Amino acid sequence: MKYIKQLSIILLVSLIGEALHYFIPLTIPAGVYGIIILYLLLYFKIIKLQDVKPTGEFLIDILPIILIPSAVSLLNYFELLKVKALGYILTAIVSTVIVMFAAGKITDIIILKELKNENKNKSGKKAKTQAKVKP
């Protein structure tokens, strides 16, 4: 019963995303609307993480199986795709490298900030401790 409730929440948010996509004349995919709505619901604690997490993890685990029909249907368009295959492959490689580089740099920045904050907190505690010890 728990999983039905969790799946219902996820599907309801997806349905709202589809409705927004239908009524708002922007080129934003319905899935993006749904993700933003779910994020806001979680952020403002309208929905608790444990209310959707197990079912969300399950859906992520079976994602490759869900995508098999889409991948197989691409075979119907093989002749059309092979004309531009090199461009698609290069775009995928270049964009992957850019995303990996950006994610690495952002992670480095976050880690350095956290280390600086830790060092400030430690040095502040040492200074307070030393001030108390000195007469």
Image (cartoon, rainbow, N blue to C red):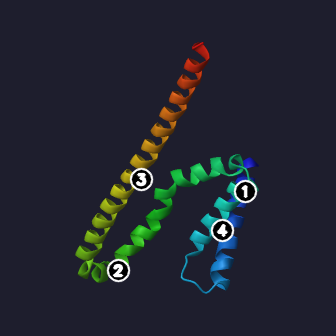
* Residue located at (27% from left, 69% from top): 89
In front of the other: 97 or 56 = 97
Please name the amino acid that badge 2 sits on.
Tyr
| Disc number lying in front (4 or 1) | 1
Vertical arrangement, residue 35 with respect to residue 111, above or below: below
- Secondary structure of the residue carrying tag 3 is helix
Q: Quadrant of the C terminus?
A: top right
Estimate the x, y position of residue 26 in percent, counting from the top left: 57, 84
Residue contact between numbered discs 1 and 3, judged by CB atoms under 8 Å: no
Residue 8: x and y, percent?
72, 60
Are there few (<14), some (14-19), or many (20+) residues within 10 Å of tag 4? many
Give the label, 3 or 2, closer to the camera: 3
For numbered disc 2, what is the local secondary structure? helix
Three-letter amino acid code at disc 1?
A: Phe
Q: Which residue is mark 4?
A: 14
Task: Report the mark closest to the observer, 2 or 1.
Answer: 1
Q: Nearer the viewer, mark 4 or mark 2?
A: 4
Q: Which residue is mark 1?
A: 44
Label 3 is placed on what type of residue?
Ile
In the depicted structure, whether residue 110 falls above or below residue 46: above
Contact, mark 4 vs mark 2 (Cβ under 8 Å): no
**Is residue 70 shown left or right of residue 77?**
right
Query: Could you say which quadrant of the image residue 91 lies in?
Result: bottom left
Q: Residue furthest bottom?
A: 25
Marks 4/3: CA distance?
30 Å
Q: What whole-number distance in Å separates the C-alpha atoms at marks 2 and 1?
A: 44 Å
Tell whether 56 sits left or right of 41. left
Q: Which residue is mark 2?
A: 77
Give amino acid for label 4: Ser
